[in-house]
Image: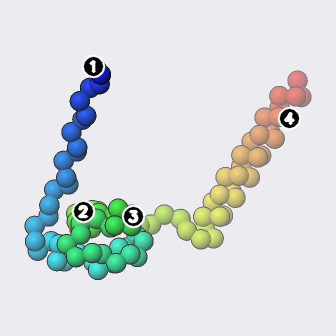
């Protein structure tokens, strides 16, 4: 006499890659370094998708790094502090 709803069906499994794509996969996970099991499409340790890796876009390059990044951050921080000081003195000098 329980009126519980029926359990929901399990989600479908991920699509299976064709045979040649599985043989060209790396032997270790590029994310965690764990060894890839034979015919595995996902890392057993972290869940990284080995099959989708080939279709993924390369990571973005460029941007500011190292000392130049700190120079830009310091410049904007000093500019913000100077602007706040200017607003403070202008507001309280009425």
**In front: 28, or 75?**
28
Mark 3 highlights which residue? 46
Mark 2: give few (<14), some (14-19) or many (20+) Cα within 10 Å: few
* Precedes in sequence: disc 2 or disc 3: 3
Mark 4: give few (<14), some (14-19) or many (20+) Cα within 10 Å: few
At 55% from the left and 68% from the top, the residue drawn is 65
Which mark is nearer the camera, 2 or 3?
3
* Precedes in sequence: disc 2 or disc 4: 2
Instruction: Find the distance from the CA under tag 1 to the CA under tag 3.
Output: 43 Å
Up-down relation of residue 28 to residue 45 (above or below): below
Q: Quadrant of residue 48?
A: bottom left
* Precedes in sequence: disc 4 or disc 1: 1
Which mark is nearer the camera, 3 or 4?
3
Instruction: Find the distance from the CA under tag 3 to the CA under tag 4.
Output: 54 Å
Instruction: Find the distance from the CA under tag 1 to the CA under tag 2.
Output: 47 Å
* Precedes in sequence: disc 1 or disc 2: 1
Mark 4 highlights which residue? 89
Mark 1 highlights which residue? 1
Q: How is the image coloured?
A: rainbow
């Amino acid at each position: 006499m329980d009126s519980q709803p029926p359990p929901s069906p399990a989600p479908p499994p991920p699509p299976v890659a064709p045979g040649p794509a599985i043989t060209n996969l790396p032997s270790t996970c590029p994310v965690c370094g764990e060894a890839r099991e034979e015919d595995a499409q996902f890392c057993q340790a972290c869940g990284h998708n080995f099959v989708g890796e080939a279709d993924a876009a390369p990571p973005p390059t460029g941007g500011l790094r190292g000392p130049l990044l700190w120079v830009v951050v310091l410049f904007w921080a000093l500019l913000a502090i100077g602007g706040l000081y200017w607003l403070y003195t202008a507001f309280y000098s009425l």
